[in-house]
Image (spheres, rainbow, N blue to C red):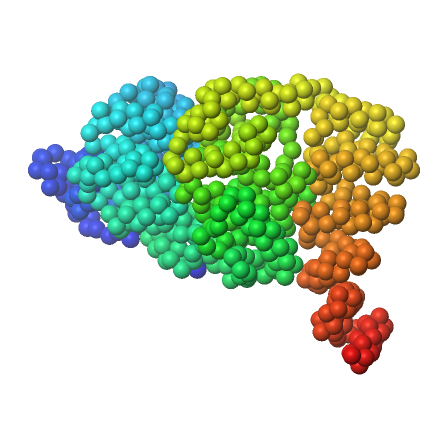
């Protein structure tokens, strides 16, 4: 199937002769209005609403015709009619507002945003235009969504839809009390504010209370209002309660089988739980009925691509890898998964209820679709219960991605989400996962970035009770990264002060449905405000000086880069040390460690170069060229064991490097680490090298040294099959025969 995100002509045909002089079914001797038609639809009177919309399409007013076509799902005709209406009445902001709402509904937020702004140019106090901008911003979790919604309410306090949207935005931020109040405000304006009723129901569901009273009120107004169930499902999914969300998407479809957006979301969320057959059915149903947003289209394309993946089942793990790199990556991922499960079983004192499925995507855009249904996701991994999806090491530039650290991070989510039955705030599960990365190794995990230092310097860290907001709706660039760092350091602080068991106590408290303020009070014995104060004091002692030195560091690093460019190596070493002292954790591009190592090498001081690159390595630096340079220097200085250990670290960063595997295999072989050599030589074979004969021979000699003669013979024969005259392989084959005869 050719998947295209289009705006198709709806398959609705009707007579051109319609009754435009009366409102069908209402007994009113006047022309129908769009409001009349929408009211009929809102009360579930779909057939009458359709006739009402049909009547609008026969009128001469292009704006009314546009509303009629829109109501009949004839989107292309509606778009043309709106364009005609805008040309006929260029100063009318209402036309652009409604046209923008059509564009928003039909997945064109760029054009919708333009139209809402054009409406504001004509009427700067148009509440509906601000409401439209809020809808567009809300789709991308933009902090302006709340700003625009507040402006709409200010301009028109009776605009109940804006209160409904504000309630939903506040619930996204986990502020249930304010969300409740905003939903109530909408209901005071209109007792038929269906989404406000749905928000009340969502609050009850999220609190594990019965929503039936609110759902019954919705049914009394509109018996088939599937959007209400879908809104509840949306908030459940946002809180990572995927199975509950799926249940409510099913309820939405049961109420309104034609709610194609719910069919699409059902398919996407079933995919998130590792299913394929029903997701395809639901997504294709949405697609064939004209719901072709990018999430739907891209998810179908991704399902089509699954034929390119191979599945490995080993014990309590299921590993899905792309065929082009499966043979290479499988041994590394399986070994790390085994180590993770063994560690976390003991640490979290629990067993997972089923096998964990890990999906690894070499194309980052496929991973983004897998996790969000849309390209452009910045994360490296995401967890859906017992399913983990993540980038492949090959999906990112070399050195940008430590895949093993990411895997430990995501597997922490698997355990914590399971342990709490998904009743855990985002800040805590993310913070604990960040904490776990450096628990595995002090060299792992991201280091404090310039953006984080600036946020600390500018006192932008959030109170712990509000920290979830930093993940959902960032108010400044890179606030999400800052929030990850802050959450991780909070967990570091708790472990340092109260011990690791206290973190587990907090897990159990969240499982008992306690809020963050209650957990802080109960498990840490202080008010959240006092915790914030003490945590910030602790953090200031650790990184406050670095934050205060940030401006001076930036100037100094620029000087170092200039000296390096001019090859003033003595100045590089002097000023590089000053820059490193000001901000020791800076291991990112153009860092002083690499500048200084380059200077040491240029001056012929290999020992000093090894020393500075070792510091870089230990503080978390993992740029492949730098670590390969370190390994080469270590080997030159007779430190082959250190060289092998350095190259081994690179397997956790960028294992799609044939030369790395070949050389590490040689180092392991020379050190009699035959199992390590076997793994590395097999990795070379998996990468399809040009010199296949020597690759197979190296594996054969490693197997032979390890006493695995059958496998040695298989590989030596494979070597000779490629190059029959390859003397080393011929010699090894004779040795194998002699050893077998001597048994």
Q: Nearer the viewer, residue 350 or 563?
A: 350
| Residue at the (21%, 36%) spot, across then down | 213
Q: Is residue 474 left or right of residue 153?
A: right
Question: For the C terminus, which image quadrant?
Answer: bottom right
Q: Is residue 277 left or right of residue 477?
A: left
| Residue at the (46%, 57%) spot, across then down | 303
| Residue at the (47%, 34%) spot, across then down | 506
Q: Nearer the viewer, residue 52 or 389?
A: 389
Q: Is residue 594 left or right of residue 308?
A: right
Q: Is residue 203 above or below residue 339?
A: above
Question: For the N terminus, which image quadrant?
Answer: bottom left
Which residue is outermost to the right?
A: 604
Q: Is residue 694 left or right of residue 77?
A: right
Total numbered labels placed on residues in the image: 0
Q: Position of residue 544 (x, y in %)?
A: 64, 20
Q: Position of residue 527 (x, y in %)?
A: 45, 21
Which residue is outermost to the bottom?
A: 741
Residue 122 figure quarter: top left
Q: Nearer the viewer, residue 180 or 599?
A: 180
| Residue at the (35%, 52%) spot, across then down | 286
Q: Position of residue 54 (x, y in %)?
A: 20, 44
Residue 218 in sight here: no
Q: Is residue 481 above or below residue 681?
A: above
């Amino acid at each position: 199937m050719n998947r295209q995100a289009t705006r198709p002509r709806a398959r609705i045909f009707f007579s051109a002769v319609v009754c435009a002089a009366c409102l069908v079914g209402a007994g009113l001797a006047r022309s129908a209005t769009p409001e009349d038609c929408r009211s009929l639809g809102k009360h579930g009177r779909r057939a009458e609403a359709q006739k009402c919309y049909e009547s609008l399409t026969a009128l001469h007013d292009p704006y009314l015709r546009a509303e009629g076509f829109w109501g009949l799902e004839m989107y292309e005709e509606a778009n043309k009619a709106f364009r005609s209406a805008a040309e006929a009445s260029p100063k009318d902001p209402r036309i652009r507002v409604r046209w923008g709402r059509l564009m928003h509904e039909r997945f064109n937020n760029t054009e919708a945003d333009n139209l809402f702004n054009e409406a504001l140019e004509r009427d700067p106090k148009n509440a509906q235009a601000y409401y439209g901008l809020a809808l567009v911003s809300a789709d991308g979790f933009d902090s302006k969504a709340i700003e625009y919604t507040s402006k709409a309410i200010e301009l028109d306090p009776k605009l109940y839809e804006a209160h409904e949207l504000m309630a939903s935005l506040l619930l996204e931020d986990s502020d249930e009390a304010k969300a409740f109040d905003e939903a109530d405000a909408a209901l005071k304006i209109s007792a038929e504010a269906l989404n406000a009723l749905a928000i009340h129901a969502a609050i009850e569901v999220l609190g594990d209370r019965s929503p039936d009273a609110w759902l019954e009120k919705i049914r009394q107004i509109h018996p088939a209002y599937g959007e209400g169930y879908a809104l509840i499902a949306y908030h459940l999914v946002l809180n990572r309660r995927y199975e509950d969300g799926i249940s409510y998407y099913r309820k939405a479809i049961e109420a309104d089988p034609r709610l194609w957006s719910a069919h699409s979301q059902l398919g996407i969320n079933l995919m998130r739980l590792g299913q394929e057959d029903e997701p395809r059915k639901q997504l294709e149903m949405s697609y064939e009925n004209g719901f072709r947003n990018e999430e739907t289209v891209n998810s179908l394309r991704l399902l089509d691509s699954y034929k390119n993946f191979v599945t490995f089942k080993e014990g309590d793990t299921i590993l899905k890898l792309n065929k082009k790199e499966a043979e290479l990556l499988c041994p590394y991922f399986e070994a790390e998964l085994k180590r993770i499960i063994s560690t976390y079983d003991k640490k979290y004192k629990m067993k997972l209820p089923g096998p964990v499925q890990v999906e690894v995507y070499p194309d980052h855009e496929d991973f983004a679709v897998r996790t969000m249904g849309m390209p452009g996701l910045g994360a490296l991994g995401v967890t859906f219960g017992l399913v983990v999806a993540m980038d492949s090491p090959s999906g990112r530039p070399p050195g940008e991605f430590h895949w093993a650290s990411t895997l430990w991070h995501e597997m922490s989510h698997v355990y914590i989400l399971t342990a709490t039955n998904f009743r855990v705030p985002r800040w805590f599960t993310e913070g604990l996962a960040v904490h776990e990365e450096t628990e595995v190794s002090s060299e792992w995990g991201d280091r404090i970035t310039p953006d984080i230092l600036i946020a600390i310097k500018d006192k932008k860290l959030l109170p712990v009770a509000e920290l979830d907001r930093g993940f959902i709706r960032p108010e400044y660039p890179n606030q999400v990264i800052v929030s990850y760092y802050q959450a991780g350091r909070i967990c570091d602080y708790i472990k340092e002060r109260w011990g690791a068991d206290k973190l587990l106590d907090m897990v159990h408290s969240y499982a008992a449905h306690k809020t963050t303020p209650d957990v802080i009070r109960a498990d840490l014995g202080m008010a959240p405000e006092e915790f914030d104060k003490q945590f910030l004091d602790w953090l200031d002692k650790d990184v406050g000086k670095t934050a205060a030195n940030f401006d001076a560091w930036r100037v100094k690093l620029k000087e170092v880069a200039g000296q390096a460019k001019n090859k003033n190596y003595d100045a590089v070493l002097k000023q590089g040390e000053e820059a490193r002292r000001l901000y020791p954790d800076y291991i990112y591009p153009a860092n002083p460690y690499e500048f200084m190592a380059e200077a040491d090498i240029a001056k012929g001081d290999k020992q000093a170069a090894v020393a500075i690159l070792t510091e870089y390595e230990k503080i978390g630096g993992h740029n492949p060229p730098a670590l390969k340079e370190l390994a080469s220097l270590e080997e030159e200085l007779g430190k082959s064991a250190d060289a092998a250990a350095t190259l081994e670290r690179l397997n956790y960063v960028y294992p799609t490097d044939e030369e790395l595997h070949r050389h590490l295999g040689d180092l392991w072989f020379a050190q009699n680490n035959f199992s390590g050599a076997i793994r590395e030589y097999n990795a070379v074979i998996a990468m399809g090298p040009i010199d296949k004969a020597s690759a197979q021979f190296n594996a054969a000699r490693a197997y032979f040294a390890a006493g695995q003669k059958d496998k040695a013979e298989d590989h030596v024969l494979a070597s000779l099959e490629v190059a029959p005259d390859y003397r080393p392989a011929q010699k090894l084959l004779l040795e194998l025969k002699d050893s077998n005869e001597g048994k």
